[in-house]
Image (cartoon, rainbow, N blue to C red):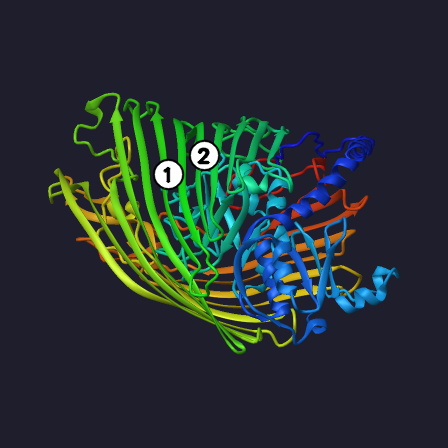
Amino acid sequence: MDMGNQVGLRLGGRPTKRLASLLLVALFQTTCLTLPAAYAQSEASRSELSKQVAFNIPAGSLSAALLQVGQQAGIRLSVNAQNIKGINVSGFKELMTAQGALDVLLDGTGLVYEIDPSGIIIISSLQDTVSAGDGDPSLLPVIVTASSGDAAGWQGAPEWVYETPRAISVIGRDEIKNSNARGAADLFAGVPGVNVADNPQDPGISINIRGLQDQNRVNVMIDGARQNFQKAGHDEVGRFYIDPAFVKQVEIEKSAISGVGGAGAMGGVVNFRTIEASDLIRSGKSYGVEGKLASGTNAYNFSGNLAAGVKLTENISFAAGISKKNLGKYDAGSKGSLTYSSSGQPIVFTGSETLSWLSKLNLSLGDDHEVVLGALGFHDAFTNSTIGGDFQNDSDISNITGTATYTWQPDDNWFDLEAKVWANRTQNDQYRLPRTAGAGGFDNDHALNTFGGSLQNTSEFDLSKLTISWNYGVEAFRDVGKSTTVPDNPADDPNGLWIGADPSGERSVFSAFNQFALSYNDLIKLDIGLRYDQFHLRGSSRALEYDLTGVPSVVDQSISNSGNRFSPTFGLSMSPIENLQFFGRYSEGYRVPTVMETFLGGEHTGGGLPYLPNGSLNAEQAKTWEGGVNIQLDDQLIENDRLRLKLSYFNREVENYIALASVAGVTFDLGGFQYQIPYYQYANLYEPLKTQGFELEALYDAGRFFAGVAFNRSYIDLPDTFSFDNPYTMFGDAKDRVILLNVAPKTKLSANAGLRFWDERLTLVGVSHMLNLMASSASLLAVTKQMIIPLLISTVPMSSMRMQRFG
């Protein structure tokens, strides 16, 4: 795998002494950074503890309240509930630091806490503290320990992931910063059940969750703003664009949800959260700067980013950043054979030049109100081609996302309000050079404007041992697609049919939701949700129609489609013993047709392939059963070790799955032989699509050493017949007629292990990724708090849906 780094070495029969020399260099550079790294570690810990957080802690047991403080503050926190059994506290809602929250919770309990220089929190009884006097502090009964800023689980997942009774994965900030990701696709290499289609001729990526992909089946968001852009081609059609330099966390829901983000989607939700000023400013400082420069082998020419945050007043902070990346034509692998490129030679039409930027303003309006305004931009110029590399397309992609979020969290159990409005524009301006078929060049420009918003509130009630949380609200969005094709020679397209597979049109979606969560004494939890989705599509399309003699005519069609549905979710979890949770969940999802699927019309750009719109498409419906277990164990084998594990099984059935199909048009006689006009149209599959599988992610961390693994095995049952609304044919054989279905690899395995030295200032990490258990590779990294030094680099296949980059 290409990685951007300061130093690099590729295996391939080179002398081992070069590796030893490089290791010595790495250790020397790390030693020189020992003092700054130690300071950074301590400052990072205290920074997390002093960061302002909008806490919402329900009344109940002290142990449960302390875990909530750790979860909401983003600190690692382990509670020995037995030592504080029977202590109950009142809940509170307030904007404060984690230290302030501890002060509130421990007031009147007879407990006190202290923070040692490394950031460890020690909570003990006041009586034991006094009686101990000047004795050995290790004799004090440690009730809670917390190490701030530390990730709890796999890929930096925070603690709450292993307390959530459903299939969810999180990629943490440290994992993202240390990954040296070539692009956003690389971030998902270790996420079980998630694969990425990454075409190196286009900087956009498409996410596949449990076999579902494209056409907004998986809702991808940036800070809650949907990325609905669709671009037709000879591979995946749903692409989004983001630079990982500004991403602080990625949250991945793997099934339909009842809350914000679930409208019109059934395959899951992926939300990229971007950095803000508090992520860049150390405790006690008013500003902070973060930057990175990288380069690597195999055409990874340059990657650099710079971000700065400033605290203007106590209530106002601002962050801004810029990122630049240059990727050239990488060399093909030397093993095996390639159809369209020579072994060991640069791959045709690969490489790109990317410029990204970010700005974010945080306004605290008193203790209860906050407004966050954010903007994120992405621009990339690149050249791609069709299959065979014989036709050249010069593309220019821009993606701009703006968000405005208001939160109100008063000291009242009835209100925890969030209002959000957002907008996104993704535009692809493409010039296609003349084809060998005789047609001249042409501009093919496509843009999708999406805007929407959401309003939600959470109310909480405490009834003795029963805690009730009620989340309810609405969300809505609208897609407006606009495509234009202008040939260099107007005579090439006299009827204006080259609108291609990126049609114009509008789609509106409205959704309302309710979700109740009931918890009995932290032993049994019940979730019941209900979502109502409503959609409407409207627009026009143009198509060729033929009479029985084969004479074509151009027909303009006005198209409209609408529908609605209620979709329930139900979840139950039980914790028979502390730190062990079993869960089961049933969810239904409703995926509405897109602008592309509905208004497809005209001809393939350049002519030759006619398309038909379909205003009678049914929305897809998914039903998913899943079950699993969460495990959180501390201090089991050695002192201060921890194990975090999430295992889940799923079984999903999708009805009315929509796929692009070859459909039969009218048949006419051409002087002795018959000819049937072939069309291409999006159609509902007649039989359901079924997927099932299981996923595992686990991390054992003992301080000086650690090891983790992520694994999934999935199965897919593809239907073999389909139906569609067409005046000529109602059923067909999917084997020969369905053009494209996205299928994820059956097996995916990721593993890592490492050692930490010099009070965790130096970390050596070994990483391995495998797909279908047919290929494997490893990387060894030397990681410090301030830099990453690669020691060994070799091929890491990221997905079977992306082109192989190395041999």
Q: Is residue 549 above or below residue 701?
A: above
The label on residue 202 is: 2
What amino acid is labelled 2 in the image?
A: Asp
Nearer-the-camera pick, 178 or 45: 45
* Image coords of residue 16 (percent x, y): 81, 34
Residue 655 at least partly seen = no
Is disc 2 in contact with disc 1, using a CB cutoff of under 8 Å? yes
* Within-10-Å neighbours for mark 2: few <14, some 14–19, many 20+: many
Of the residues tagged 2 and 1, which is closer to the observer?
Answer: 2
Q: Position of residue 472 (x, y in %)?
A: 38, 63
Is 135 rendered above or below residue 681? below
Which residue lies at the image location 57% right of the left edge and 59% below the top edge?
Answer: 161
| The quadrant where residue 138 appears | bottom right
* Residue under the point 60% across and 48% down: 51
Q: Say the numbered circle drawn on residue 119.
A: none
Write down the quadrant of residue 67 in the picture.
Answer: bottom right
Residue 786 % position (x, y): 70, 36
Query: For the N terminus, which image quadrant?
Result: top right
Tell which residue pokes out farthest to the right in this image: 135
The amino acid type found where label 1 is placed reads Gly
Q: Which residue is found at the position 72% from the left and 54% from the top?
A: 707
Mark earlier in primary sequence (2, 1): 2
Structural distance between the alpha carbons of marks 2 and 1: 11 Å
Q: Nearer the viewer, residue 748 or 339?
A: 748
Residue 724 shown left or right of residue 224 in the figure: left
In this rendering, position of residue 675 left or right of residue 70 = left
- Residue designated by label 1: 233
Q: Give how far across and how far down residue 101 sits, in percent.
A: 61, 58
Residues packed near mark 1 inside 10 Å, few (<14), some (14 to 19) or many (20 plus): few
